[in-house]
């Protein structure tokens, strides 16, 4: 079940991306749609299970992320003010709700390695927004990221591997997978401003609640089988 477990690890990174706190009326409200492209040589069986697109909804302290893959759909609802998160997985006909509270979220943040971010002078346009190129160095690995200051999203990366980055990343590469051997390129293709309905941040019924540890154990994550 390594393919399923690898997907879980991908999701554990994706669900935290770009959660933010809106403290100013000028803060961005709307959606950002990213394409997801695998980088390098990856097992075709794994590639087939990876998402190709992520849609992120922003409204005040609340964030909703939607994605689909060959294995099913995933929705992640987060709240910066309460530090609570809910991952809704509809995988192979089974529905799971994985919830984490403030203490668990903050513990995860504390474990994220410190990174060095160096912003250069090179620029390019991504999804219609001017971005600056930056080198992101963490755990001895260097990645190129493209940051825009034209979208006002406070604490855009507060609980991600990119928590030391100021600004909104519209293009970046994330190392993930069980052994950190899968690189995915995230590139924004559309930014849409507009009100997001409150119902988008409400947990639906019909999902089996469990912890992330219980979910990993169910699919052999603890042993890697």
Image (spheres, grey):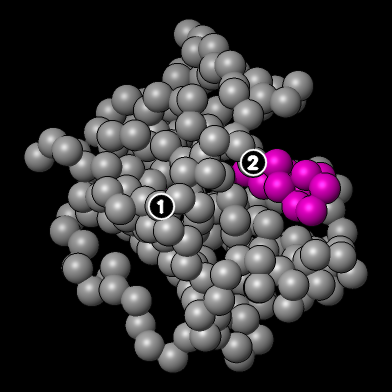
Instruction: Give the residue drawn at x 42%, y 37%.
Output: 158
x then y, percent, for residue 119: 50, 13
In the rendered structure, the answer to whether residue 41 lies left or right of residue 210 reads: right
Which of these two is toward me, 45 or 59? Answer: 59
Residue 52 appears in view: yes
* Vertical placement of residue 209 versus 216, above or below: below
Q: Which mark is residue 174?
A: 2
Which of these two is toward me, 114 or 49? Answer: 114
Q: In which quarter of the image is the C terminus?
A: bottom right
Q: Do the residues bearing badges 1 and 2 touch, measured as CB atoms within 8 Å?
A: no
* Vertical placement of residue 121 versus 211, above or below: above
Write the start and end of the magenta stretch as one range.
175-190
x then y, percent, for residue 68: 55, 71
Q: Would residue 71 be counted in the magenta stretch?
A: no
Instruction: Give the residue drawn at x 29%, y 73%.
Output: 202
Residue lying furthest top: 121
Instruction: Give the residue drawn at x 50%, y 52%.
Output: 104
x then y, percent, for residue 61: 25, 50
Q: Residue 102 carries which label?
A: 1
Report the magenta stretch's main SS: strand
x then y, percent, for residue 126: 43, 35
Q: Would residue 180 be counted in the magenta stretch?
A: yes
In the rendered structure, the answer to whether residue 76 lies left or right of residue 217 reads: left
């Amino acid at each position: 079940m390594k393919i399923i477990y690898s997907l879980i690890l991908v999701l554990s990174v994706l669900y935290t991306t770009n959660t933010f706190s809106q403290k100013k009326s000028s803060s961005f409200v709307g959606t950002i749609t990213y394409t997801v492209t695998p980088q390098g040589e990856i097992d075709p069986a794994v590639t087939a299970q990876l998402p190709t697109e992520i849609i992120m909804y922003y409204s005040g302290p609340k964030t909703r992320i939607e994605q689909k893959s060959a294995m099913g759909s995933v929705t992640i609802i987060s709240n910066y003010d309460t530090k609570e998160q809910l991952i809704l997985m509809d995988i192979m006909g089974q529905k799971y709700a994985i919830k984490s509270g403030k203490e668990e979220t903050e513990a995860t943040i504390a474990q994220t390695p410190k990174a060095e971010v160096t912003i250069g002078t090179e620029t390019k346009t991504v999804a219609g927004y001017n971005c600056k190129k930056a080198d992101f160095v963490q755990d001895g690995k260097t990645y190129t990221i493209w940051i825009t200051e034209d979208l006002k999203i406070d604490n855009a990366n507060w609980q991600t591997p990119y928590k030391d980055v100021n600004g909104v990343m519209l293009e970046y590469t994330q190392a993930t997978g069980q052994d950190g051997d899968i690189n995915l390129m995230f590139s924004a293709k559309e930014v849409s401003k507009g009100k997001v309905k409150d119902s988008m941040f409400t947990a639906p019924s019909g999902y089996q609640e469990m912890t992330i540890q219980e979910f990993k154990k169910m699919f052999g994550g603890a042993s890697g089988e």
